[in-house]
Amino acid sequence: MNKQEWTLEIADTFINFLEGSKNPVQLMQIAKEGIYDIKNMLFVHNLEAFVKGVEENGTNARKIGEMLAKSDYGAEYGYAFLKLIDSYETCDKGRALAMITDSMTKGFISPNDAFRYGGLIRDISHSSLLFLKNNVKKGVLYKTSSEEKIYINELLRYDLMYISENNGYAFDKQAFYIDKFGLSYLEEGKYLYSEKDGGIPPIEKFPKVPVSIVSEGVPYEE
């Protein structure tokens, strides 16, 4: 089949996989028939990482489809999800998306959250995501290297970190969710999975934001 035919076939088969009517072996057989260039090769690696993650977690693929269909994407959920997988530059991101979908099927996050976290994983560099994963439980970061500042600045842009009191840098609660349900999902000892916020500090324990004193000003005299 040519590239256009393969694209249509892989999209339909992926949606069927999420509906439970195609198995992972069938999906990956069709995917591997379409390796025309490096971009296609990367897509196939990402898709394989996603499918393996779904299988390893024992996630019900049919349930993924049923829940994603309730998102704001509606009937277009399959194409939107496949586009996420295609946009990832590393297969680690494909695997993280599988963890996010398993979290969704277990009721920890909503279908819209799954798309939102998958989009953030797409937009944020692999290095900054690793920095988040390795440091999110450390509380406030004060002494940071010039390289770490690059990662921090990127996470600040996406509101996953904020400047705390005493010129420190702290992680927002959404950063904990991305780590817990995506990057570090089910890693032993890091979080508790009896509830959504298990292992995440209560909001009152998060580092405080500096209080800005803003003067109302004095009007000019005529």
Image (tube, rainbow, N blue to C red):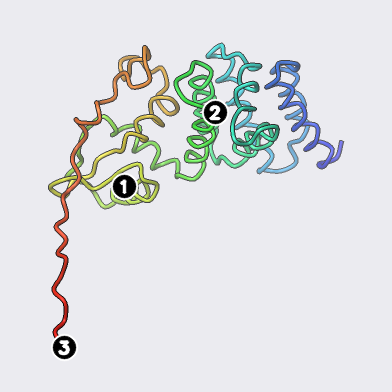
**Marks 3 and 2, how far apart at CA:** 59 Å
- The residue indicated by pointer 1 is 152
**Marks 2 and 1, how far apart at CA:** 28 Å
Which type of secondary structure does the marked residue at label 1 adopt?
A: helix
Tell me where residue 70 sits by quadrant.
top right
Which callout, 2 or 1, points at the residue further toward the start of the chain? 2
Observer-side mark, 1 or 3, equals: 3
Tell me where residue 56 sits by quadrant.
top right
Seen at 17% across and 49% down, the residue is 210
Horizontal and vertical percent for residue 136?
29, 33
Horizontal and vertical percent for residue 66?
64, 21
Can you say whether 211 is above or below 89 in the image? Answer: below
Seen at 58% across and 26% down, the residue is 50
**Marks 1 and 3, how far apart at CA:** 47 Å
Instruction: Kindly identify which numbered label has been placed on residue 222.
Output: 3
Instruction: Kindly identify which numbered label has been placed on residue 111.
Output: 2
Which type of secondary structure does the marked residue at label 3 adopt?
A: loop
Kind of residue at disc 2? Pro
Few, some or many residues within 10 Å of mark 1 (<14, 14–19, 20+): many
